[in-house]
Image (cartoon, rainbow, N blue to C red):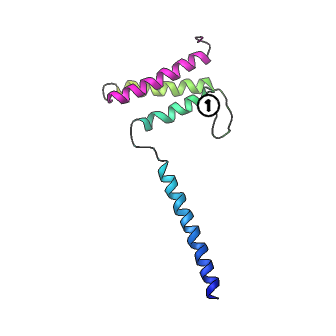
Amino acid sequence: MKKENKGKNKEKDKKKETKEEESAGREKIIPPLDFSSLVLPFYTQAIIKLGLARDPITNKEAEDLDLAKRLIDLLDLLRERTEGNLKPDEEKFLNACLQQLKMNYMEKANIIKI
């Protein structure tokens, strides 16, 4: 009977270790708390809505130019409202993201041809 309990305890310990490892793994993917943490979700969603990346939920590429434009406009609003308050590297990062998104949007919307 003691051997059975030891086996059950080992199994419980393994399950506990696995849960702890999974929890530790989730902690590792939390992005740093910085300005890019605000920009990247909008940027990533805009890239997906421009059809340049697969939607992680559907695993398909699908364009929604209206929503992509809205996301770009939100980033533009963020740039306007934070003007003069960003560090040089934050401003450069936001401007680079916006430039890339705007160029891709204009190409997809047939405003320009590259």
Camera-nearest residue between 99 and 66:
99
In the displayed structure, would residue 11 be above or below residue 87? Answer: below
Q: Quadrant of residue 80?
A: top left
**Residue stretch rendered in magenta on the structure:** 86-114
**Where does residue 4 sit, x and y in percent of width and height?**
65, 83
Query: The C terminus is located in which quarter?
Result: top right
Query: With respect to residue 28, does 113 lie above or below?
Result: above
Amino acid beneath label 1: Ala
State the SS at label 1.
loop
Q: Residue at x 49, y 57 (%)?
A: 24
x then y, percent, for residue 76: 45, 24
Position of residue 35 in the picture relative to residue 12 (left or right): left
Picture quarter containing residue 92?
top left
Q: Is residue 70 or residue 50 the one in the foreground? A: 50
Asked whether 27 or 68 is in front, the reply is: 27
Q: In the image, residue 19 lies at what x, y percent?
A: 55, 63
Main secondary structure found in the magenta portion: helix
Q: Is residue 33 left or right of residue 4?
A: left
Q: Which residue is mark 1?
A: 53
